[in-house]
Amino acid sequence: MSQVVKVERHDAVAIVTVDSPPVNALSVAVRKGITDGVKSAIADPDAKAIVIMCAGRTFIAGADITEFGKPPQSPSLHDVIDTIENSPKPVIAAIHGTALGGGFELALGCHYRVATKDAKVGLPEVKLGLLPGAGGTQRLPRAVGPEMAVKMIVTGDFVGAPEAMKAGAIDEIVDNLASGAEAFARKVIAEKKPLRKLRDDDSKLAAAKADKSIFTNAAAAANKKNRGLEAPLAAAEAVSHSLDQPFDQALKSERELFMKLMTGEQSKAQRYAFFAEREAAKIAGVPDGTKGRDVKSVAIIGAGTMGGGIAMSFANAGIPVTLIETGEEPLKRGLGVMQKNYDATAARGGIPADAPAKRMGLIKGVVGIENVKDADLIIEAVFETMAVKKEVFGQIDKHAKKGAVLATNTSYLNINEIAKMTQRPQDVLGMHFFSPANVMKLCEIVRGEKTAPDALVTAVNIAKKIAKVPVVVGVCDGFVGNRMLAARGKQAEKFLFEGALPQQVDAVLTKFGMPMGPFAMGDLAGLDIGWRSRKDRGIKSEIADAICEAGRFGQKTGKGYYKYEAGSRAPLPDPDIEKLIEETTTKMGLKRRQISDDEIFERLMYPMINEGARILEEKIAQRPSDIDVVWLYGYGWPIYRGGPMFYADTVGLKKIADRLSVYAKQTNDPSLEPTPLLKKLADEGKTFASLAKGG
Ligand code: NAD
């Protein structure tokens, strides 16, 4: 018998158990084991019904994605499902944990499905740029109706067992998986229940076949938030064939659409991102088996934009937080913003109606830094000034308990210098969240020169616990993300002096798939922050300064690089800005020119990639894919383009290096010359990905 699948018989019920940790993924061994197991139960004259279930924490949680891109091995999932569906004896899937992707498709190929109450089912293939390729797009609409099916398949969202049962995808909820499934199987035998094959049951399709708009409306609604992704559109098309093609033909169409996605660029990028995220959690130089410290209580200092958002992230994960401010007034303001934020989300239906009260109940607002004393983790989110940070860390050191991890949310400042203000630099690190912190998933974990490995592991673990994606980076000005952003921002600003307008520059990036360009982003963050910092440092930026001098601080004043209608966040080009830019450049004696979108694109992107290469040279990032994860989760880089370093490899490093040299000369900026690492890789015809494989 197979190593990963065993068959037992309990009276008339044959139990086929998959035991392939960690998640019983559908590797070739599992596929073969299930096929053999079901066949042996069919051949067993004493078995009258067959249960397929899994050992461990979950039912089959999907395909074995390490097999993607390799030559297919028999039996395919299609073959497995055929064997199950055509079994002359009823086959029952017994689901616990999560039945996902191929796992759920296999369950849909069974004649009946039972599940524990807390089980979840879903077809999340779109998240890897794919669609369910083993009949899921045809059987799910027959189980739950095409409207719900298209929603589930296009969004990839999971559905809990009770909801799935109400919709028709689950036949019974059981308390105990094994005994409940067996009891259900005996009932099927005793009542001589028919072999229910979803493929033959079109009853739930009738309404949408009669009225096409039922499906088209549901598909459009499901695809509403889709920005540039091919897979959700293809998935909706595949589901639509449940209505206009016979089952077997629709399966062929599903296969064709699947293969097109599988061999396309988008899915390649999305699968890369999936692995990159997992890889990012591995920290070089931390001894194997290093355990994080226990974090039972958290204190956050500063209830401003970031402190508030970070506190919400903890409360969302059910972790209590002490939120510390300098006085009652800023505390009240901070708590008020959070309450409003939660209320708005609840009003939209994004969280349950009782969630705002529950979550706010986890956040205890207090005045005075001495309140850090019980916290295992302290996150500082006060003003971005070295003097203030130093003062605050000196105070934290006085009051924090021994062994507490002390984190700063600084965007740019030197963490080693901050750590020196304490007697315990080994406990100090950066936890750099992104705005809005309750939404953005990235957390750069900044490792100081003295940061202890177990402090680092603690930060990584807690970030994961609050549903963030941690990426470990080193100390430098702006760390990974903001440092690369600065390289892009410098070019963006230059374009305004040379002849472009904010809307032209931004449009080039949104067309590429970024959620917004640098000027809209500036308006969102607030232009006054940079203005104040330039004044402090005695730096001038004629256009940006003139905009701020006109009282235009961005969205918060209704005007910045763009104008905004009351209550709207949509940037509208403003003729006043055009005038201001032209007047400023004329006054400076600059000659404006037409700049092509291609030049804008290359000069925004390639210097960023060059900076990424420099970051790798300096070992600020551990691997190119970590840089990509930073951009995917911190800046909304389109997932179907993999991240800047992945994207660079698709363009070709030689082209990028050559163009950088051209622009270095054209703009008289030697810092744009390709960095030695980029140049070396380009000359050798290599990629950034080759570095991960050891050069
Ligand atoms: P903010 O001005 O909105 O909030 C800072 C808060 O800290 C204020 O409410 C202030 O009252 C409080 N504060 C100041 N000194 C304090 C003290 N000694 N004790 C307790 N509270 C004190 O600023 P922000 O935008 O939330 O930024 C906070 C930090 O996060 C900065 O280091 C910033 O660089 C960083 N950051 C900001 C962003 C962003 O987009 N805003 C993104 C990432 C990181």
Image: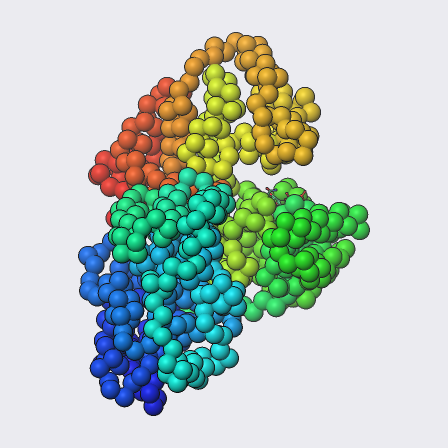
Displayed-image quarter of ligand 1: top right
Snapshot quadrant of residue 296? bottom right
Residue drawn 67% across the image and 58% down it? 353
Q: Can residue 129 be spotted in the picture?
A: no
> In what quadrant of the picture does the N terminus appear?
bottom left
Is 659 positioned to the left or the right of 485 in the image?
A: left
Residue 484 vertical placement versus 322 (above, below) = above
The residue nearer to you, when weighing 300 against 205, is 205
The residue nearer to you, when weighing 639 against 134, is 134
Residue 56, position in %: x, y?
Answer: 40, 76
Farthest-out residue, bottom? 11
Snapshot quadrant of residue 199? bottom left
Tally of numbered discs:
0
Is 676 positioned to the left or the right of 411 in the image?
A: left
Residue 633 vertical placement versus 581 (above, below) = below
The residue nearer to you, when weighing 635 against 12, is 12
Is 688 positioned to the left or the right of 146 in the image?
A: left
Q: Can residue 478 be spotted in the picture?
A: yes
Residue 220, position in %: x, y?
Answer: 47, 43
Q: How is the image coloured?
A: rainbow
Residue drawn 36% across the image and 53% down it? 242
Residue 465, position in %: x, y?
Answer: 53, 62
The residue nearer to you, when weighing 643 against 13, is 13
Residue 153, position in %: x, y?
Answer: 42, 54
Residue 565 vertical placement versus 345 (above, below) = above
Residue drawn 60% across the image and 53% down it? 350
Residue drawn 34% across the image and 40% down it? 647
Farthest-out residue, front? 210
